[in-house]
Image (tube, helix red, strand yellow):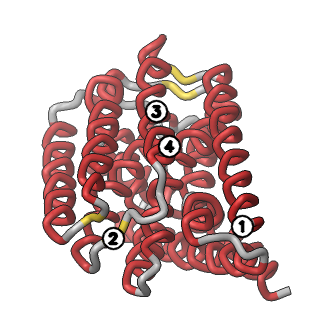
Amino acid sequence: MLIALSIIGGFIILTLGAEALVRGASSIALRLGITPLIIGLTIVAFGTSAPELAVSVKSALAGNSGIALGNVIGSNIANIGLILAITALIRPIQVQSQMVRRDIPLMILASMLFWGLLLDGELSLIDGVILLSLLVGYLVFSYFSSKNTTDADGEIIEEGPKNPLLSVAFIVVGIGMLVGGGILFVNGAVDLAKVFGVSEVIIGLTIVAIGTSMPELVTSVLAALKGESDIAIGNVVGSNLFNILGILGVTAIVHPVSALGFQSFDFIVMLALAVVILPFAWSGLRIGRREGVTLLVAYLGYMVYLVNQASTQAVV
């Protein structure tokens, strides 16, 4: 009963938090003259990734590297294969040329770097510093590049609170609710998975990854329904970048992260989904329902593979 309440209550809090974050971030974008795309890639993306940060650091400190690493790999896979797919099915996503030329390629490069750093079996303190430094560089570059973007490059977004302090409050409260709701949802989901004796790696790649990705799902869907495509896709790409450079960077600095128990196939799926959305977005600068179905089928196929893995482990 308590597990069910945790999962349901966490989802409700996530929904309310996502609504507050999108409204506050949209308003700040209008006031500062920053494009919605940059807001989606930064404030919204990092806010919705806050649960991943909390769960990964907490898991690493507790010695549960399987959950910490699986959380990031699984979340990045879910962000594209599940969240971007569902968002595109609900409403086709318009993609800015900047996203195709810069941000998606950077996400692909970050995914390749992540895999490369783990070839020695763990993410060390030095690896963490490298990842975090790259994140800072990306943020600085994004901020200054947004100042050179004309108003015509952005899209019209829904205006939020009139008072700037209220807009900031919406963002802070929204992020707080996303963190709280995400952790509540994940705790319930992990408890449920442990009842069935599922391994840490599988829990991290599935239950925890989907649970901590719920903020991205709710936020992207709400943004798409409001016609704010820039925030929707920026949220997904920005979250994937933040998951690798920020979350893994901080987690590795706090405590080394072991890759024990992970297979190359998990990294291949993560990298393949990152790569495949580039031609999808390049074609007509939009990700439509057909692409959404393709991504969703790929994600469901990966979930079937993980379920089979879990069943094999249970038998052994």
For the point 42% across and 38% down, the residue is 271
Mark 2: which amino acid? Answer: Val
Contact (Cβ within 8 Å) of mark 3 with mark 1:
no
Where is mark 1, residue-wise?
316
Above or below, 189 relative to 90: below
Mark 3: which amino acid? Answer: Ala
Spatial separation of the CA atoms under disc 1 and disc 2:
26 Å
**Could you tell which of marks 1 and 2 lies nearer the N-terminus?**
2
- SS for callout 3: helix
Q: Quadrant of the N terminus?
A: bottom right
Spatial separation of the CA atoms under disc 2 and disc 4:
19 Å
For discs 1 and 2, the disc positioned in front in the rendered view = 1
For discs 2 and 4, the disc positioned in front in the rendered view = 4
**Could you tell which of marks 1 and 4 lies nearer the N-terminus?**
4
For the point 69% across and 38% down, the residue is 301
How dense is the environment of label 1, judged by Cα within 10 Å: few (below 14), some, or many (20 and up)? few
Where is mark 3, residue-wise?
272
Where is mark 4, residue-wise?
265
